[in-house]
């Protein structure tokens, strides 16, 4: 941006302030601006109005217009809402600065302390739509011209801090650097206020300086540890000395009394009084790397990677492993000030490649700088980045961090911290202090989800709203209750479940959260958050009362329920939870209570006890989803009473869940996890053979003893969960995600499961073979309602060598694509037939792939985009170096057009569905077609249209919107996969803890046979509670694995679609017979995958309707 022609020195300082890209440059130019205007920095909103009054030329006016528009919102009351409130904000991170800006707009006096002296973090943050709008409203484009100009919405932490720092300085926030907050200083007497304990912070380079020689010349009062000092005394002598101390914080800061403290100092610092809870998963090692961005044409052509996860794209990571030896879980690439890569690496891979010197069980010791080899880490990050971008970034040079070292690091995100409460109130000598948390010290974000800055901003807004309510005179308990009610919503927020109109977002939480309930937490529930000195906390009394209530009656309730459910079944009389079950009939009586018509008494006539018990266990597992925890032999012999009680408690829990079912005879078992049932059938279809069941008290792999909580049943055997791992990669084997090789008898994950007659050829398609096996199982699964589908399908006809790939123009020829089993035809039939109304005049016969292309292209007719043959497109990101006022207005108009398209997107989507449905005929009801098209085709169609239609270049706004929407869909899938992976890891860690507790209880019960009956009863009650928790976690795990299957199929569909596009884009006259045959095969595979995804969608719809019916029945 050109400088104004005026000779006013303030204008030059202001322009330097706008363009400054280093923290020191921002501070020095702002200091020069204030001196030129005769102002003192840190004067609050009055300072902003004085600056605005003296800088009224065109370049400054565009910024004042944005800030005035924000400040004019009614919630700020023209800057008078909190004029008597004094706030201290700790930390100049993005969330701390954003909170300071809001407090300044409210009119409060805001002082911010930061222990660092510059911003140096290049790591890139993903932005939600509302954060983009919020930052633009604060003038982000004025401070940083390239703000959100690519296909992915992100910004580096350093740039975000810089632009928020500039806004905070303009609004009069008083900022002190190199000052560390160490604690609170309570008021010493009545009439005084709360102060902060502060100390100077040394520069980063000095704090991290490593040396091997120390020369002490600090005077006689300081002698390094280890030296012995001898005293030589003489007569009393008095002299004059100079006492030199390190720099201290300014006197006015040390004496600053405040009534609000907002802590945004990061996850490692939480003010005293707050309780932090740890959310732990499996070991997770993250690696971040920042490379120099030279902004060359070649670099701009390299597409960003919104996220690739191993959980659904095994082929990419298998190829990475074969090529480089690097084993990753995921990888993300953003292009900002630097080329930013972040990835999750396997520990064994880091050890094997020499990145880690030694394996340590403690994570802190494992990733300590002394255990990490910097050169090896740099080679690791460079190789991974080079592979992910196909080497198109050229020679990768590391950017420099704050210490002048290559900006690459390994960090641990195994555990994440979350504060139990978001605010507290302390009171002493009548002086009240409101404390609030924002940023990482409130909730540490899980980086793959990209939620850190978005939820951090939301927490900053909620904290500022709390301060406003505090300034209005609301009671402490009322303020705390409202804040905790908002805090309950924070972890659930996403762009999809917040208000869609981001332009209306304001400080008032009602503008951001739909269905807001500020009374979800009552004042009585937050009394323990109000700490008054010399008052006995109420919490202690509550804790004592709650802890004195032991859980009783679970065993008696279970026995009474078993007696009620088995009453009337011939030959069954239950008197206890052991010997009454030895004949197997009692178990057989429970099964039809959950699903009638199973195990009728007539079927058990003449059947022995062992066979009857085996039937009951098998039927419960196959039809009800209740996995066994003991063998039939153990039930008959009565050798495992604890295992039997745990097994019966699963029946009890399932029955309680189904007690309100309006249709107890429904095809899906209403009381059990339908996901467990579905995955169980899928796994049995995959395995094909089932081994003879073993006893159940010994692990089939290690031979060790199995306690009740440790037992995992798979393929008729029982295992420790820690033993049930892939034979090759030792990864945890998830439900329906493993197979047993019949040759060696070992268990493998699907990625490493050897296939009969299959030889590795080293191609990239190798890892996809096991996934195909699972997909075959999905389409062979029987689903509810199969009697309404056409029976007796024909056997599919495989393409023959030499056969003509171009069908003759007759309808039967166009229906050659068939599904290979009754279930596949029942799921859907994909008939590719032209619609006469949409086709141009008759042309020579076209292939099925050409017809599919016509359906896709024709679906966008009427958008202003003519239908033409897709061409290869090279997307070059044109990054804006800066915007003039007119350019910025044009950019805002583009945003308005984009938002208009967002609002009318359902119309475009309906047009797409209508056109595509004319060419794709599914054997399912209309609502099923809409559901299928929404989930299966539309996201891919967006990306295909945006990248392959040259006509969209004539419509840059729509082209950018389509690309952005496609990238957003990819990121949603990545975030979904990572949240699933994280939750699976947390479940595994929780199950390990439950197993450890269960082993202790079971050992106590078995060894302490002479213990009082009351103690044994208490132990059993606790064991049953652990069993219920485990069943709940296993059910949640199965639900997540269903979603994993969806993601796998979605990724495979995308790969096949891209492969098919390669054939479609070729001229028909240039295709060989082999090309046409390969095209037909790819199209057939794509049809199969669509059918398989349809199977999962139908399953989920059946489950949703079942749950809806259960809810309706419960309300009735």
Image (cartoon, rainbow, N blue to C red):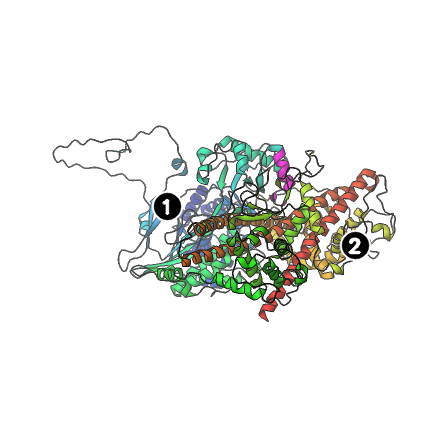
Looking at the image, can residue 169 be seen? no
Q: Which residue is labeled 2 in the image?
A: 919
Q: Nearer the viewer, residue 556 or 780?
A: 556
Secondary element under disc 1, as helix, strand or loop, is: strand
Question: Residue 112 appears at what percent x and percent y?
Answer: 40, 50
Stretch of the chain drawn in magenta: 295-322
- Magenta segment: does it hold 320? yes
Q: Which residue is labeled 1 in the image?
A: 180
If the image is split into quadrants, where does the N terminus sit? top right
**10 Å crowding of disc 2: few (<14), some (14-19), many (20+):** many
Question: Residue 1027 appears at what percent x and percent y?
Answer: 51, 55
Name which of mark 1 and mark 2 comes first in the sequence: 1
Residue located farthest toward the bottom when viewing the structure as drawn: 1116
If the image is split into quadrants, where does the C terminus sit? bottom right
**Side of 114 where 353 appears, left or right:** right
**10 Å crowding of disc 1: few (<14), some (14-19), many (20+):** many
**Side of 1097 where 848 appears, left or right:** right
- Magenta segment: does it hold 1033? no
Figure quadrant of residue 549: bottom left
């Amino acid at each position: 941006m050109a400088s104004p022609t005026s000779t006013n020195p303030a204008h030059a300082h202001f322009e330097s302030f706008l363009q400054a890209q280093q923290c020191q440059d921002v501070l020095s130019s702002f200091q020069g601006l204030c001196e030129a205007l005769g102002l003192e920095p840190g004067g609050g909103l009055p300072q902003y109005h004085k600056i605005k009054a003296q800088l009224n030329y065109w370049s400054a006016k565009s910024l004042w217009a944005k800030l005035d528009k924000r400040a004019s919102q009614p919630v700020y009351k023209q800057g008078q809402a909190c004029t008597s409130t004094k706030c201290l904000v700790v930390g100049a991170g993005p969330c701390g600065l954003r909170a300071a800006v809001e407090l300044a707009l409210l009119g409060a006096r805001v002082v911010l302390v930061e222990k660092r002296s510059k911003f140096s973090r290049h790591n890139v943050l993903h932005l939600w739509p509302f954060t983009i709008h919020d930052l633009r409203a604060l003038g982000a484009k004025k401070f940083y011209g390239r703000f959100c100009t690519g296909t992915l919405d992100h910004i580096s932490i350093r740039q975000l801090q810089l632009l928020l720092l500039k806004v905070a300085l303009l609004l009069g926030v008083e900022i002190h650097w190199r000052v560390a907050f160490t604690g609170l200083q309570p008021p010493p007497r009545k009439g005084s206020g709360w102060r902060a304990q502060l100390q100077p912070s040394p520069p980063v380079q000095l704090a991290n300086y490593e040396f091997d020689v120390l020369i002490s010349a600090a005077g006689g009062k300081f002698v390094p540890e280890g030296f012995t000092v001898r005293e030589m005394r003489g007569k009393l002598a008095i002299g004059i000395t100079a006492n030199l101390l390190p720099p201290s914080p300014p006197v006015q800061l040390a004496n600053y009394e405040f009534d609000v403290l907002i802590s945004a100092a990061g996850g490692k610092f939480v003010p005293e009084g707050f309780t932090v809870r740890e959310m732990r998963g499996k070991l997770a090692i993250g690696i971040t790397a920042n490379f120099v961005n030279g902004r060359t044409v070649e670099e701009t052509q390299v597409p960003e990677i919104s996220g690739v996860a191993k959980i659904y794209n095994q082929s990419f990571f298998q190829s990475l492993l074969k090529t480089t030896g690097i084993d990753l879980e995921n990888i993300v690439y953003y292009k900002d000030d630097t080329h930013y890569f972040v990835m999750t690496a396997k520990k064994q891979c880091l050890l094997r490649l020499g990145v880690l010197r030694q394996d340590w069980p403690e994570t802190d010791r494992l990733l300590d700088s002394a255990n990490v080899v910097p050169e090896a880490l740099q080679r690791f990050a460079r190789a991974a980045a080079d592979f992910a971008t196909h080497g198109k970034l050229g020679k990768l040079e590391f950017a420099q961090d704050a210490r002048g070292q290559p900006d690459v690091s390994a960090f641990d995100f195994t555990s994440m911290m979350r504060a139990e409460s978001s605010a507290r109130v302390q009171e002493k000598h009548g002086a009240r202090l409101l404390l609030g948390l924002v940023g990482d010290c409130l909730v540490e974000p899980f980086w793959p989800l990209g939620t850190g800055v978005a939820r951090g901003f939301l927490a900053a807004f909620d904290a500022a709203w709390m301060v406003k309510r505090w300034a209005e005179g609301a009671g402490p308990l009322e303020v705390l209750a409202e804040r905790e009610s908002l805090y309950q919503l924070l972890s659930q927020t996403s762009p999809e479940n917040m208000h869609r109109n981001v332009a209306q977002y304001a400080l008032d939480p009602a503008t951001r959260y739909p269905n807001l309930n500020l009374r979800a937490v009552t004042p009585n529930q937050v009394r323990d958050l109000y700490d008054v000195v010399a008052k006995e906390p109420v919490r202690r009394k509550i804790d004592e009362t709650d802890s004195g209530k032991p859980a009783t009656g679970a065993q008696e309730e279970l026995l009474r329920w078993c007696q009620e459910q088995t009453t009337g079944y011939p030959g069954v009389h239950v008197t206890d939870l052991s010997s009454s079950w030895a004949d197997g009939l009692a178990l057989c009586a429970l099964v039809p209570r959950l699903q009638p018509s199973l195990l009728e008494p007539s079927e058990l006539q003449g059947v022995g006890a062992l066979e009857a018990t085996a039937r009951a266990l098998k039927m419960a597992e196959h039809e009800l989803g209740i996995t066994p925890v003991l063998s039939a032999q153990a039930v008959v012999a009565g050798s495992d009473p604890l295992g039997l009680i745990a097994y019966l408690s699963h029946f009890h829990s399932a029955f309680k869940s189904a007690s309100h079912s309006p249709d107890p005879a429904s095809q899906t078992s209403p009381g059990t996890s339908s996901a467990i049932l579905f995955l169980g059938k899928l796994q049995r279809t995959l395995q094909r053979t089932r081994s003879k069941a073993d006893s159940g008290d010994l692990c089939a792999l290690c031979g060790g003893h199995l306690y009740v909580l440790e037992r995992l049943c798979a393929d008729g055997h029982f295992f420790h969960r820690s033993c049930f791992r892939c034979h090759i990669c030792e990864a945890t084997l998830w439900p329906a995600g493993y197979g047993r090789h019949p040759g060696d008898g070992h268990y493998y994950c699907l990625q490493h499961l050897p296939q009969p007659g299959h030889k590795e050829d080293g191609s990239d398609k190798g890892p996809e073979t096991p996934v195909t096996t699972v997909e075959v199982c999905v389409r062979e699964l029987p689903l509810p309602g199969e009697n309404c589908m056409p029976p007796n399908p024909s056997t599919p006809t495989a393409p023959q060598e030499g056969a003509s790939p171009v069908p003759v123009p007759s309808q039967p020829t166009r229906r050659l694509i068939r599904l290979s089993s009754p279930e596949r035809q029942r799921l859907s039939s994909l008939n590719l037939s032209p619609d006469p109304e949409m086709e141009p005049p008759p042309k020579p016969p076209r292939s099925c792939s050409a017809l599919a292309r016509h359906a896709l292209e024709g679906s966008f007719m009427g958008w202003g985009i003519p239908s033409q043959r897709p061409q290869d497109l090279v997307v070059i990101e044109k990054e804006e170096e800066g915007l003039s006022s007119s350019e910025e207005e044009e950019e805002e108009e583009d945003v308005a057009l984009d938002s208009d398209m967002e609002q009318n997107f359902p119309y475009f989507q309906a047009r797409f569905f209508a056109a595509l449905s004319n060419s794709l005929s599914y054997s399912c009801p209309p609502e099923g077609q809409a559901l299928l098209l929404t989930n299966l085709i539309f996201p891919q169609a967006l990306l295909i249209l945006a990248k392959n239609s040259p006509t969209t270049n004539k419509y840059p706004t729509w082209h950018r919107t389509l690309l952005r929407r496609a990238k957003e869909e990819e990121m949603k899938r990545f975030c979904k996969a990572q949240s699933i992976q994280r939750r699976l890891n947390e479940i595994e860690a929780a199950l390990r803890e439950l197993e450890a507790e269960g082993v202790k209880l079971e050992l106590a019960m078995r060894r302490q046979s002479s213990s009082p009956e009351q103690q044994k009863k208490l132990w059993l009650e606790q064991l049953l509670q652990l069993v219920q928790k485990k069943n709940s976690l296993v059910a949640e795990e199965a639900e997540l694995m269903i979603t994993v299957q969806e993601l796998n199929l979605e990724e495979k569909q995308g790969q096949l679609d891209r492969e098919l596009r390669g054939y479609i884009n070729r001229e028909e006259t240039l295709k060989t017979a082999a090309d046409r045959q390969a095209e037909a095969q790819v199209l057939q595979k794509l049809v199969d995958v669509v059918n398989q995804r349809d199977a999962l969608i139908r399953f989920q719809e059946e489950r949703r309707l079942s749950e809806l019916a259960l809810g309706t029945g419960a309300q009735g």
